[in-house]
Amino acid sequence: MVRGMIDVVGFMPCVTGMFEVAYEIAPYVKYVVASEEHHLEELDEEYEYTWQYLETTWDLKNNTDMRPEEFAVSLVEQFTPCDFPMLVLYSYKVILKKRRTRT
């Protein structure tokens, strides 16, 4: 690690993984890993529809000499994208609508 720099930063939701965010943190971070997937928090209960933290953590634990770029690559390689059918997107809109009417 370069003194004063973070080796790897990962953003799972698409909003935080925008280019503008990466630009702002560029002086402080060597590698940025971001997902372009939109993660539906209420519906993302299934383990397979997210970053595979367990696998990437085990990769790092089992290979303590792993370089930051190798760890960043492992995050990308272990990621499982999710296809959201229209029913899921509709359900998400209903959830948001219910939340707004409660407040």
Image: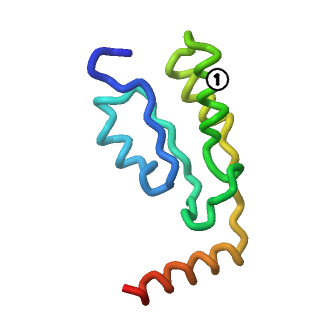
Which image quarter is the C terminus in?
bottom left
Counting from the top left corner in percent of width and height, residue 92 is at: 58, 75
Which image quarter is the N terminus in?
top left
| Label 1: element kind | helix
Q: Residue at x 57, y 83 (%)?
A: 94
Counting from the top left corner in percent of width and height, residue 79 is at: 66, 42
Counting from the top left corner in percent of width and height, residue 10 is at: 48, 39
Q: Residue at x 62, y 14 (%)?
A: 63
What residue is shown with label 1? 59
Q: Nearer the viewer, residue 59 or 24?
A: 59
Q: Is residue 11 above or below residue 92?
A: above
Q: Nearer the viewer, residue 30 or 99?
A: 99
The image quarter containing residue 93 is bottom right
The image quarter containing residue 89 is bottom right
Question: Circle 1: is it few (<14), some (14-19), or many (20+) Cα within 10 Å?
Answer: some
Q: How is the image coloured?
A: rainbow
